[in-house]
Amino acid sequence: MNFHVLTLFPEMVENGLKTSITGRAIEEGKISIDATNIRDFSEDKHKKVDDYPYGGGAGMLMQAQPVYDAYQHVVSQIPENHKRRVVYVTPQGYPFTQRTAEQLAKNDDLILLCGHYEGIDERVLEEIVTDYISIGDYVLTGGELAAMVMIDAISRLVPGVLHNEMSAETESFHGYLLEYPQYTRPEEWHEKMVPEILLSGNQKKIEDWKLEEAKKRTMKRRPDLYDQYFALHECKDKLMLNKTLNMDMIESINRGRAILIARDGNDVLIQDKETGYFHHSGTKKDFFMNLPKEVRLSIKKIVLHQEEMVEPVHKLLNLQYRLVCYQSVYTPRERLPITGLYRADGKPTENGVTIRPLTMEYVDEVQYTYDHADYQKVQDKDYIKERIEKGRMYGAFVGDELAGMIGVHNDDSIGMLYVYEKYRGKRIGTALQTYMINKMIDLGWRPYSQIMVGDEASTKIQRSLNMFLSKTPIIWMGQD
Ligand code: ADE
């Protein structure tokens, strides 16, 4: 990710970000930050960049010309195929949130325009700005600090900046809840003891305590967030009435990725923050009809959980039916036994099998494999690359040879299991699936996959690992 800052104080931005984690990320080439001095592009002989506002009013405005030329200079250095946005950091923008950071992190290049004085001539903003964003309802002396806040929050979402291993860390743990209180050594400080439960070793009780404390804290400090948490969890209770069928929605809520869009009795519509997919469960025929028009029009891809909704959704939203899958869910809370399949310490088993995250050196091989697979085709090359980059693909190796692989989709479901023909019948598929299930359990997640209707090989493996298949399928719909 490349950040380009248009500013009157380039050294402020560069100095502020060259230390700590962002500094390391710059050194490792995970991000780059270049600050361009708008003043260098002034055509005025005194390098003036501001002037009085027409119609009067307090203070000075930045002129269009130097801002535009600085912008053109930066753009000329960005390859055409790069995804980019141009953000004007301003108190007149929409609020910057974790969700905004997640969305912006999907770009290759971000241009951040920092204002000074009383603002910038509207005409240049109209020509170049794609997003107006504020970091809060207060006014700073300039946009630099705001831009730095955004760069920091976005950088930590760039793959490799924090670490590559799959973790629940970047999502707030239960979604919409603040963190529970935390303690480290010593056990007693200023006559205050660490809560006893945290020393008990009873993991289940500890998890319950953390959740309760997080709820209490959120209720007190952020009642607005708590209301959202509460509404989503009421929906979850409805979805739990058919746990296996609705597991994608339940887990989206559990993992803090769901936004509640609408609810009508037992009908629930959420949107997954990461994938942008809407997910609906329920049978009210007029549910979509009754949505506000702008919500209806924003639905471009959706997962339906009842077949009878396909027709009304197709008619109303003009979405084509795409994929029909069974939900496959691992319901026990305990990890699966791994004996003979792989070793937890990463050393080879007696048969020489190890499992480890796939690194970028395997991108071409993995892409080729899925592209030419006899089952389990995944043709989107960028998707595979992104999954590997994010540490979401794992390989089973026999000696040094790649024998099979598995991944985690961008909705965090398990998928893409593939074993090379030569290695089939040797429990490699079972080993990979077991590895992924245990990883999810360790993160406190409920492992699930989606199996295309008719995929006998996968169905067999799922059943052998105690995964429950939904009785009826879910239906993926989209515009293409
Ligand atoms: N510039 C001045 N104040 C700001 C704020 N609150 N957010 C973003 N940019 C700003």
Image (cartoon, rainbow, N blue to C red):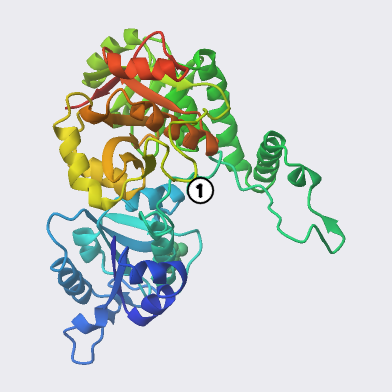
* Secondary element type, mark 1: loop
Look at label 1 and name its amino acid.
Answer: Glu
Return the x and y of residue 225 as percentages of the image width and height. 57, 41
Residue 58 lies in quadrant: bottom left
In the rendered view of the protein, which quadrant contains the N terminus?
bottom left
Labels in figure, total: 1
Residue 408 against residue 121 in the figure, above or below: above
Place of residue 286 in the rendered image (x, y in percent of width and height, measured from the top left) = 37, 12
Q: Nearer the viewer, residue 19 or 132?
A: 19
Ligand 1: quadrant of the figure: bottom left
Crowdedness near tag 1: few (<14), some (14–19) or many (≥20) residues, C-alpha within 10 Å: few
At x 35%, y 54%, the residue is: 159
Q: Quadrant of residue 217?
A: top right
The answer, for residue 413, to whether it is visible in the render is: no
Residue drawn where x is 36% and y is 82% of the image:
11
Q: Nearer the viewer, residue 338 or 141?
A: 338
Residue 141 is situated, as x and y percent measured from the top left of the image, at 45, 74
The residue beneath circle 1 is 169
Q: Is residue 303 above or below residue 79?
A: above
Identify the residue at horizontal 49%, vertical 33% (top origin).
Answer: 438
Q: Is residue 126 above or below residue 430?
A: below
Q: Nearer the viewer, residue 262 or 59?
A: 262
Left-right relation of 80 to 350: left
Q: Quadrant of the C terminus?
A: top left
Residue in the image at 44% along x and 53% along y = 95
Q: Is residue 25 something that shows in the picture? A: yes
Q: Position of residue 35 (x, y in %)?
A: 29, 75
